[in-house]
């Protein structure tokens, strides 16, 4: 190679100066010619397009220079290509970028006319002109000729056609055949008729003709002449010709589609100037928007103006419908806010994750009794939505009914920091403060979440079950896919999954029984399919949530006002859930999750307590249930106790004092006094302990007979002032197994008074720590300590 270069150099040095100059000039021109085309042929800004999974256009945003210029396509519609070549450059397929005969003819015509009346440019030369955007001169024409031949060497004929079709001026602020097809005819270029294709073929020659109030006849004549040429050359049949010439010109510009506008806006902000193919199904998206618009009409009568919904195919993890809000075009009531990505107060929507976490750690059994009584934990006094209490309720029922008190007590047992970390692992991105900032309110809406994150977290439970059932393996959790052109990443095994399949399945099972009888009778919900679903309502009726899951689909809905204004009746059950079921109704029905038996175990469970069978649980009160494997280490029934009663069951007795009454041992279901006080109001079959017989009353040692309902031991009370400025009072309440008994009250050893039947007393303690003691006539006493701030 080196010797070859040396030989060339010797040959060049031997040339005379004139030849050296000519050869150098030739080499310079050759190098210029080879590198004359810029790396990027067109640097124009493009519109942002978003299409659905099948390539159908959902919406677009105009380019930064105010032009409707779609990103270049790879191909040109067949009818438009035929019309364009026939009108502009019949020998396009034959020439090397320049047609000498056309240039010669044009020159003769221009000389005769004394002005430029014909250009003689090929489609390739016109593509170069569009690329350079220079003033038309003879020198510029020469440059176009040279660059056209260079373009032919670097691009195929199809690519050159596509470049021209994407950048040809089409009148006004419309550029390219794709944008023109939508703006003038209201559909994509692939659906162009012969008449429409002919219009777009002749338009770049005189783009000003596409003015809806000027020279319509001239444009019509040019179109029809082109159609006549196609007929004469037997390119189209006479029937096609007659139909084409009968088509009227477009009367007005068409608006581009506005389907999934919040998704289109998101794409414009994150990836402007590109054509993005989403996973959304256009037809499903349109049906979703119709449903939401209909419900919005109803909800807006109550001042509820915003709605968002997400539909996901859980088998592929692809988003099928993305409706960030309603009324985008109206631009009112915050309708352009994408609620799917906006942080909102979570209400009760996070409760299933706590239930699932406690199940899989064996810290809770699916039907275990939880307390449902008024509580006050360091000044935090949660209440149920209904403002009523059951005394005790099974865990799965507490979840289905979304009871607040059992959830707070469960979170206190599980630990706020631990639950906080769990929520982060599920994908909640809005937990931007330390765990102790949220405290126990974390389970009741004390934090914010996005519909996107929360829906992903619910999908995590469904995926845990389906993945395990498929091959016994857990996989790392993935976010929903929105971009169709991005293939899913290779799934990696997860050795420490957030959700265990057994606990997740039991949670989903519990959520199939969600019912708010105090709000709506869900027996009349039109959907008959089995859905695991949960609602949530934020404090002040500002946000209403509903998320539903089947093995195939997830539907998540939010209702409310983007402004944060609360409205009476704005609850998850009354608004979001109704929309959610309406969306489920037009989705194909699916089966149900198969039990992941490998992650479940059979356990003997006491029916009344929901705990593992204890030694005093009656055989008739034991069921066999599936529980997570760690559930076998759960709590053993502590509510069934062995007691001695007289033969007639009227009294409690001891062996030494039973006398003629006889004695027998029985198993008795016994709740703590404060639980019992509320529980027996809802369970008439509940039996309180019988009294001791008169012979055994003295010196008897009984179970706890009293328990404070308010205040909770160690509570911190805040006594507020009344409207007249006087110091307010707190109502202290006591539960006694024998309500009619007399009870004597003492505050800091000072006698306050006595109560019977209803054990309530109004008190106004001073700030500081206090001791409250109650004593009944039988000598039973109870003392608690509390603090007043």
Image (cartoon, rainbow, N blue to C red):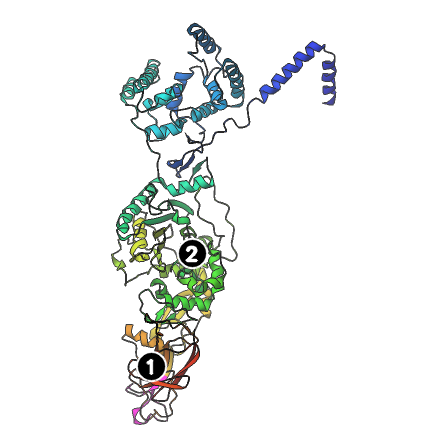
Decide which of 611, 244 is in the foreground and name it: 244
* Quadrant of the image occupied by residue 84: top left
> Image height check: is 20 above or below 720?
above
Give yes or no for residue 660 being in the magenta stretch: yes
- Position of the C terminus, as image quadrant, is bottom left
Give percent across and percent down for residue 577. 31, 54
> Image height check: is 630 above or below 646?
above
Give yes or no for residue 784 being in the magenta stretch: no
Give percent across and percent down for residue 124. 48, 19
**Region rendered in magenta:** 643-668
Q: Is residue 218 left or right of residue 451?
A: left
* Quadrant of the image occupied by residue 571: bottom left
Label number found at residue 473: none
Q: Is residue 264 visible?
A: yes
User: Crowding near pointer 2: few (<14 within 10 Å), some, many (20+)?
Assistant: some
Tally the numbered discs: 2
Say which residue appears at 49% left-offset and 58% top-offset. Answer: 433
Distance from the alpha carbon under mark 2 to that under mark 1: 41 Å
Q: Which residue is mark 1?
A: 736
User: Crowding near pointer 1: few (<14 within 10 Å), some, many (20+)?
Assistant: many
* Quadrant of the image occupied by residue 412: bottom left
Give percent across and percent down for residue 540. 34, 59
* Between discs 2 and 1, the one toward the N terminus: 2
- Position of the N terminus, as image quadrant, is top right
Q: Which residue is mark 2?
A: 448
Q: Secondary structure at mark 1?
A: strand
Q: Is residue 65 left or right of residue 386?
A: right
């Amino acid at each position: 190679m080196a010797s070859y270069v040396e030989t060339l150099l010797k040959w060049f040095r031997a040339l005379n100066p004139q030849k050296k100059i000519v050869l150098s000039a030739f080499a310079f021109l050759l190098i210029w010619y080879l590198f004359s085309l810029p790396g990027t042929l067109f640097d124009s800004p493009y519109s942002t397009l978003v299409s659905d999974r099948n390539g159908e256009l959902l919406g677009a945003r105009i380019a930064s220079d105010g032009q409707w210029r779609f990103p270049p396509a790879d191909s040109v519609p067949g009818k438009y290509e035929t019309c364009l070549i026939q009108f502009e450059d019949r020998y396009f397929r034959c020439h090397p970028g320049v047609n000498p005969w056309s240039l010669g003819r044009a020159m003769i015509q221009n000389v005769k006319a004394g002005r430029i009346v014909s250009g003689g440019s090929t489609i390739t030369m016109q593509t170069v002109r569009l690329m350079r955007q220079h003033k038309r001169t003879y020198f510029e024409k020469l440059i176009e000729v040279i660059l056209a031949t260079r373009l032919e060497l670097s691009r195929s004929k199809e690519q050159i056609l596509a470049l021209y079709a994407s950048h040809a001026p089409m009148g006004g602020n419309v550029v390219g055949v794709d944008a023109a097809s939508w703006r003038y005819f209201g559909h994509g270029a692939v659906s162009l008729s012969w008449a429409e294709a002919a219009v777009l073929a002749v338009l770049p020659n005189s783009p000003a003709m596409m003015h809806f109030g000027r020279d319509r006849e001239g444009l019509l004549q040019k179109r029809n002449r082109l159609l006549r040429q196609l007929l004469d050359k037997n390119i189209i049949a006479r029937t096609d010709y007659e139909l084409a010439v009968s088509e009227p010109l477009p009367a007005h510009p068409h608006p581009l589609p506005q389907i999934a506008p919040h998704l289109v806006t998101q794409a414009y902000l994150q990836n402007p100037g590109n054509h993005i193919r989403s996973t959304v199904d256009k037809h499903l998206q349109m049906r979703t928007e119709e449903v939401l618009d209909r419900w919005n009409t109803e909800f807006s009568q109550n001042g509820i103006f915003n709605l968002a919904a997400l539909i996901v195919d859980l088998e592929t993890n692809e988003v099928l419908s993305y409706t960030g809000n309603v009324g985008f075009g109206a631009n009112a009531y915050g309708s352009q806010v994408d609620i799917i990505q906006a942080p909102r107060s979570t209400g009760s929507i996070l409760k299933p994750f706590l239930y699932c976490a406690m199940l899989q750690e064996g810290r809770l059994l699916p039907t275990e009794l939880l307390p449902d009584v008024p509580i006050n934990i360091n000044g935090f006094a949660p209440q149920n939505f209904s403002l009523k209490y059951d005394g005790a309720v099974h865990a799965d029922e507490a979840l289905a009914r979304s009871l607040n008190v059992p959830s707070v007590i469960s979170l206190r047992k599980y630990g706020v920091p631990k639950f906080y970390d769990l929520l982060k692992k599920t994908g909640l991105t809005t937990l931007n403060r330390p765990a102790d900032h949220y405290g126990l309110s974390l389970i009741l809406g004390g934090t914010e979440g996005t519909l996107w994150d929360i829906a992903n977290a619910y999908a995590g439970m469904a995926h845990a079950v389906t993945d395990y059932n498929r091959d016994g393996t857990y996989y790392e959790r993935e976010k929903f896919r929105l971009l169709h052109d991005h293939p899913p990443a290779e799934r990696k095994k997860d050795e420490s999954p957030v959700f265990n399949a057994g606990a997740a399945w039991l949670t989903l099972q519990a959520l199939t029984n969600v019912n708010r009888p105090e709000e709506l009778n869900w027996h009349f919900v039109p959907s008959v399919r089995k859905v695991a679903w949960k609602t949530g309502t934020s404090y002040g009726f500002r946000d209403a949530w509903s998320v539903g899951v089947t093995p195939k689909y997830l539907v998540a809905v939010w209702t409310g006002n983007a402004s944060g204004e609360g409205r009476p009746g704005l609850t998850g059950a009354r608004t979001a859930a109704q929309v959610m079921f309406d969306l489920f109704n037009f989705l194909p029905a699916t089966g149900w999750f198969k039990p992941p038996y490998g992650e479940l175990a059979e356990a003997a469970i006491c029916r009344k307590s929901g705990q593992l069978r204890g030694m005093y649980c009656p055989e008739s009160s034991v069921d066999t249930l599936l529980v997570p494997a760690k559930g076998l280490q759960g709590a053993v029934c502590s509510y069934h106790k062995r007691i001695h009663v007289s033969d007639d069951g009227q009294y409690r007795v001891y062996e030494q004092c039973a006398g003629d009454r006889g004695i027998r041992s029985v198993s008795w279901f016994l709740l703590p006094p404060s639980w019992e006080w509320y529980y027996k109001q809802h369970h008439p079959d509940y039996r309180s302990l019988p009294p001791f017989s008169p012979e055994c009353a003295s010196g008897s040692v009984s179970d706890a007979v009293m328990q404070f309902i308010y205040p909770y031991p160690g509570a911190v009370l805040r006594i507020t002032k009344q409207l007249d400025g006087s110091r307010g009072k707190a109502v202290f309440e006591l539960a006694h197994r024998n309500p009619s008994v007399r009870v004597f009250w003492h505050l800091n050893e000072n006698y306050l008074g006595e109560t019977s039947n209803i054990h309530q007393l109004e008190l106004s303690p001073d700030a500081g720590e206090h001791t409250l003691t109650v004593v009944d006539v039988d000598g039973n006493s109870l003392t608690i300590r509390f603090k007043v701030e």
